[in-house]
Image (cartoon, helix red, strand yellow):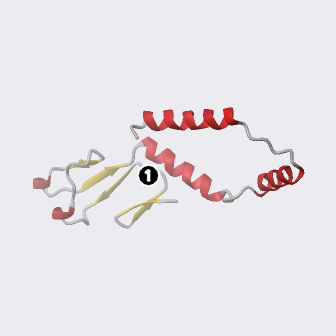
């Protein structure tokens, strides 16, 4: 999963310079966009934050993993078949609360 900006590709790149976007299409209010003022006619520069670079790296790692863990599916299937699969309401509730807390910290 490479970062692509205006046709330039990079993997965890820290910046990409471009002057290919018409001035009317640029969003100069974005905090991620830095560079010369619109009146100077210079190039705009997009900075990829370290968090975005980490997310891109994690995305690459995840994309290389299989979507389904076949060994886990087999274990659960066997547990269901032999009646040994148990559900823990406490684990489910704890996971839901952790998810809710994480989302609240992100402002969602």
* Label 1, residues with CA under 10 Å away: few <14, some 14-19, many ≥20: some
In the drawing, does residue 74 fall left or right of residue 29?
right
Query: Residue at left 86%, top 44%?
Result: 84
Q: In this view, does 102 lie above or below 56?
A: above
Query: Residue at left 50%, top 47%?
Result: 55
In the drawing, does residue 93 fall left or right of residue 35?
right
User: At which x and y percent is residue 3?
Assistant: 44, 58
User: At which x and y percent is residue 41?
Assistant: 14, 58
Front residue of 24 and 8: 24
Query: Residue at left 37%, top 67%?
Result: 7
- The quadrant holding residue 108 is top left
Front residue of 38 and 104: 104
Q: Residue furthest left?
A: 39
Q: In this view, does 90 lie above or below 4?
A: above
Instruction: Please tell me how many numbered marks the rendered image carries.
Output: 1
Query: Residue at left 55%, top 33%?
Result: 97
User: At which x and y percent is residue 107?
Assistant: 39, 37
Q: In this view, does 104 lie above or below 74?
A: above
- The quadrant holding residue 50 is top left
Front residue of 48 and 80: 80
Front residue of 67 and 45: 67
Q: In what element is the residue under mark 1? A: loop
Q: Residue furthest right?
A: 82
User: At which x and y percent is residue 57?
Assistant: 54, 50
Q: Name the residue under label 1.
A: 13
């Amino acid at each position: 999963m490479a970062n692509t900006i205006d046709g330039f590709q990079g993997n965890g790149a820290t910046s990409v310079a471009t002057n290919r976007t018409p001035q009317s299409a640029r969003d100069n209010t974005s905090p991620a966009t830095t560079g010369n003022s619109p009146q100077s006619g210079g190039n705009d520069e997009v900075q990829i934050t370290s968090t975005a670079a980490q997310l891109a790296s994690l995305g690459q790692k995840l994309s290389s993993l299989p979507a389904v863990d076949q060994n886990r599916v087999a274990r659960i299937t066997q547990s269901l078949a032999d009646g040994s699969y148990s559900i823990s309401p406490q684990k489910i509730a704890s996971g839901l609360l952790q998810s809710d807390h994480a989302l609240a910290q992100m402002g969602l």
